[in-house]
Image (tube, rainbow, N blue to C red):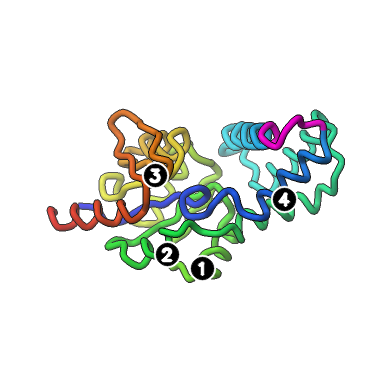
Amino acid sequence: MLKAVFLDYTGTITREDGAASMEMVKRCYMNSDAKSPQETLSYWWGNLKKYEEESYLDDFITEDEIVDKLLEQFERELNLKDNKAELHALCNELWSKSPVFDDVKDFFEKCPLPIYVVTNNGAEYVQVAMEDNGLHPAGIICGDMARAYKPHRELFEKALEVSGCKAGEVIHVGDSAASDVKGAQSAGIRPILLDRTGKKTVPGVTVIQSLAELTEILKKEQTEQ
């Protein structure tokens, strides 16, 4: 029997194309040797994921520390000339002030199960977004709490500990096959991939295009139990 929903944050609850994100990309592109905004984004997210993968248990560093390393690397490798403190503040704003997708508030209101937000981002930033948008998750589980980021299983295991649920009693919903699907599976949790573009497929994994679709799946499964 399902007892809870684990829900990803960035890209699932909040948009990645908010004002802070666009301003950061614009400044990093215009004030460096990056050849295009697309190259800037690719460089940023690729290296962010690399740092998150390496930041693990005894070698764990926070997202804020990762941002500092990224900006220093950007300066060193792509000749970034900008105020790094201001760029870091834009990252903080990205984590806490990005707009939520249109289907999020309705999902929080109609979901028949408790929702736990499982995220790499710091809880203090996610909590601000929850309060600003009138969202009330049962809990927020962040990388700092497990000293591991997605897709490491420790973050998902920490979510199970906080929720008091077993792996078979929850589902994890997120927009990344590499982070959300792979990470949930490593902890024995059933994943659901959220792809609002309708273009992705993952063998053996349910793919949905909206959180409204997820609400209907949960209601149906609750009825059948």
**Does the magenta run of residues contain 36?**
yes
Q: Which residue is mark 4?
A: 23
Calculate the distance from the C-alpha at mark 3 to the C-alpha at mark 1.
21 Å
Name the residue at 53% across, 70% down. Answer: 131
Q: Earlier in the sequence, mark 3 or mark 1?
A: 1
Evaluate if marks 1 and 2 touch, with contact meaning CB atoms under 8 Å apart.
Answer: yes
* Secondary structure of residue under mark 2: helix
Q: Which residue is mark 2?
A: 105
Amino acid type, label 3: Leu
Q: Residues within 10 Å of mark 4 (few under 14, many from 20)?
A: some
Q: Earlier in the sequence, mark 2 or mark 3?
A: 2
Q: Residues within 10 Å of mark 1 (few under 14, many from 20)?
A: some
Q: Which residue is mark 1?
A: 133
What mark, if any, has residue 194 been given in the picture?
3
* Relative side of 103 to 46, left or right: left
Relative to 82, residue 203 above or below: above
Q: Earlier in the sequence, mark 3 or mark 4?
A: 4
Q: Earlier in the sequence, mark 2 or mark 4?
A: 4
Name the residue at 39% across, 34% down. Answer: 200
* Secondary structure of residue under mark 3: strand
Amino acid type, label 4: Glu
Q: Residues within 10 Å of mark 3 (few under 14, many from 20)?
A: many
* Secondary structure of residue under mark 4: helix
Q: Position of residue 221 (x, y in %)?
A: 19, 52
Q: Position of residue 93 (x, y in %)?
A: 66, 57
Q: Position of residue 206 (x, y in %)?
A: 29, 39
| Span colored in magenta | 33-40
Calculate the distance from the C-alpha at mark 1 to the C-alpha at mark 2.
8 Å
Calculate the distance from the C-alpha at mark 3 to the C-alpha at mark 4.
26 Å
* Relative side of 18 to 31, left or right: left
